[in-house]
Amino acid sequence: MNVAVTNLPVLRGEGNLAVYLREIRKFPMLEPHEEYMLAKSWREHGDLEAAHKLVTSHLRLVAKIAVGYRGYGLPLSELIAEGNVGMMQAVKRFDPERGFRLATYAMWWIKAAMQEYVLHSWSLVKIGTTAAQKKLFFNLRRLKREMQAIDDGDLSPEQVKKIAFQLAVPEDDVVQMNRRLAGGDQSLNAPIRMDGEGEWMDWLADETESQESHMGAQQELRLRQKLLASAMLGLNQREREIIVARRLTDPPATLEDLSQKHNISRERIRQIEVRAFEKLQANIQKSAAKEGLLPVA
C-alpha cells in the first residue's frame, strides 16, 4: 500500500518561494490526538485522506529543512520535492503506537532523501563512497561556522587538524573537501522577497536540541541498542567475543592478544572478525527493515 499524495503545492522557481510558503501555511498544524487518529486511520484502513493531511501538515518542516541544505548550490525547489518524497515515506511507515510525534520520525526520512539527492547531484566531487566522506561533506560547513572560519580560502593547518580529529578523517580530505565546497554562500540575513520582507534566517532550523528531538534521539539510541543485541544473537560465542573485543571496546584488543587467547593465528582472528561483522550488519539490516526503519531504495 503506497502513499500517493497528490495536489501538493509546488515551488516553481526560486523567485516564487514567498508564494509557496504562503500556500503551505494554509495547511493546519495537527494536535497530538488528531495526528494520532489520522495515523491510525491510515495505518489500519488505508485512509488516503488521512495520509494527505499528515503529509500536508508537515510541508513547513520540509521547507525548513530544505533551506539548511541550500548552501550546496542546488535548486531549493528540487530539495523540497525530494524532502516531500521522504515525508511520504515517513507517513507510510509511521507507527503512532510508539508514542512519539510524526515530526520526530519524519525528520530523519526528510534529511535522508535530501542528502541522497545532494550526493547524487554534486558533479564537482566524488563523494558518498564512505560513511566518513559523507560525514565530512555534511558537517564541514557547520564546523567552519563554529570555528568562525568563514573565509572562502584555505583553512589554517590548525583548523584542518581540528576538523580532521573531530570527524576522524584524513587532514588531506578536509583540505580537498573545503576547496570543493568553497563558493558563495548566501547571507542568512538576505531577504526572501524583493520588498525586503522576511529573511532566510527565519527559515533555518534551530540547532539547539528540543525536548521532542531529545526524546527522539533517546528512542533511536534504545532502538539501535535493541537491534545490535538482537543481531549479536546470530553470532556464535567466539564471533561475539571477537566482535566485542575488536569493535565494541575502547581501546580495541589487538589481533595478537586475541590470537593468544583463542590459540589461533592473527590472520584467522582477522578473518573471523570480518565474517562476523558482515553477519552482524546483515542481521541489523534485516531487523531494521522489519521495523520499517530503512528507506526504500
Image: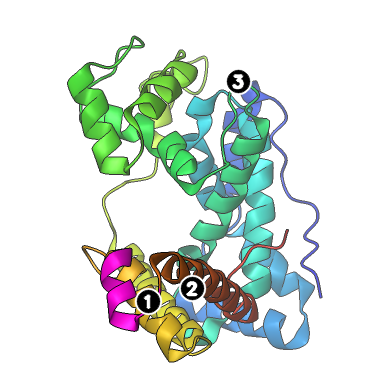
Q: Which of the two discs, 3 and 1, labels the residue nearer the N terminus?
A: 3
Mark 3–mark 1 Cα distance, whole angstroms, equals 41 Å
Image position, residue 124 (x, y; %): 60, 20
Q: In this figure, which residue is indicated by the disc labeled 1? A: 242
Is any atom of residue 52 visible in this view?
A: yes
Name the element at disc 1. helix
| Mark 3 surroundings: few (<14), some (14-19) or many (≥20) residues within 10 A | few
- The type of residue carrying mark 1 is Ile
Q: In this figure, which residue is indicated by the disc labeled 3? A: 124
| Mark 1 surroundings: few (<14), some (14-19) or many (≥20) residues within 10 A | many
Give 169 or 155, whichever is nearer the viewer.
169
Is any atom of residue 196 visible in this view?
A: no
Give the quarter of the figure containing the C terminus. Answer: bottom right
Give 22 or 214, whichever is nearer the viewer.
214
Name the element at disc 3. loop
| Mark 2 surroundings: few (<14), some (14-19) or many (≥20) residues within 10 A | some
Residue at point 28%, 64% (across, down): 254
Q: In this figure, which residue is indicated by the disc labeled 2? A: 272
Report the span colored magenta: 255-264
Was residue 257 drawn as part of the magenta stretch in this picture?
A: yes
Toward the left, the furthest residue is 158
User: Tags 2 and 1 in contact by the CB under 8 Å rule?
Assistant: yes
> Residue 245 falls in which quadrant of the image?
bottom left
| Residue 81 falls left or right of residue 145 | right
> Residue 270 falls in which quadrant of the image?
bottom left
Mark 2–mark 1 Cα distance, whole angstroms, equals 8 Å
Was residue 86 drawn as part of the magenta stretch in this picture?
A: no
* Mark whose residue sits in front, 3 or 2: 2
